[in-house]
Amino acid sequence: MTPDPALSGLDLLAIGAHPDDVEVHVGGILALAADRGLPAAILDLTSGDLGTRGTAETRRVEAAEAARILGVPRLVLDFPDGRFTAEEAYRTRLMAEFRRLRPRILILPSPEDRHPDHRRAHHLAREAAYYAGLRNYPCDGAPWRPEAVAWVGGENPAQPDLLVDVSATWERRMAALDAFGSQFAPDATQPATRIAHPAFRRGVVGRAMHWGSLRMCDWAEALWCDRPVSPALLRLLARLETPA
Ligand SMILES: [Zn+2]
């Protein structure tokens, strides 16, 4: 999962603090992008090396398999899990990646999640997205600012701003989540964790079913965004929901 130097000009970049964050929330959206031929990728800030279950290497293998199932490339920056900060060194590393990948739309972690890494990753990526567009900011690459950012919800989110019909990719989306066996599969030999409890997976399914009921489809994924909603974001969602 070393960054592919040829990868640039993305329509969509989904960012997670840890491998599996993106698959918990927006795997269906990424699979749709892959199916529609829209350039998209996943960027994990860390390799999840502080995880209670699974080693960084186990999670790397699982993350690669999940991305293969979704049909998108995956990059990892190897920031230290739990210990990366909002300092400039991390921000410029992320800015250089934005300038190289040139994503038009970003999907970020939730700013209100219970995990501090998710909240910090949200703010770090938002700041990096802004500063990456400043011509004179000392950072590798030509200036680039994404046209819009959206973000995922926490475990008990408020009303979404946007709902995306992911019924066409639902099976693959859940297969990608289940590829993270070390994290989500019940295993009595491993320490008990919140995300390995069956209730966590039921929450993922239940929210997608609820949002689907609001969207009048089988399954939907939710996004939040700044108001007024960016036309670039609306255009992307329309393309995602239009069969090729
Ligand atoms: Zn996480």
Image (cartoon, rainbow, N blue to C red):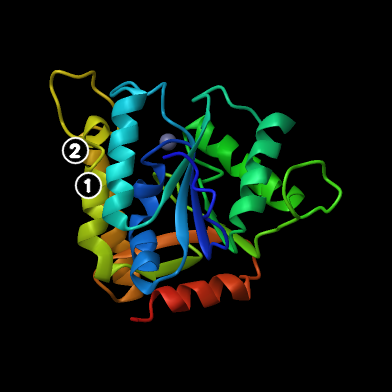
Ligand 1 quarter of the rendering: top left
Does 203 sit above or below residue 162?
A: above
| Looking at the image, residue 167 lies above or below residue 223 | below
Instruction: Give the residue drawn at x 63%, y 71%.
Output: 230
The quadrant of the image that shows the N terminus is: top left
> Which residue bears the numbered disc 1?
202
Is residue 64 toward the left or the right of residue 107 in the image?
Answer: left
Q: Which residue is mark 2?
A: 198
- Give SS at disc 1: helix
Q: Is residue 242 above or below residue 75?
A: below
Q: How many marks?
A: 2
Q: Quadrant of residue 220?
A: bottom left
x and y, in percent, of residue 40 in the image: 46, 60
Type of amino acid under label 2: Pro
Residue 13 appears in view: yes
Q: Residues within 10 Å of mark 1 (few under 14, many from 20)?
A: few
Residue at mark 2: C-beta within 8 A of ligand 1: no
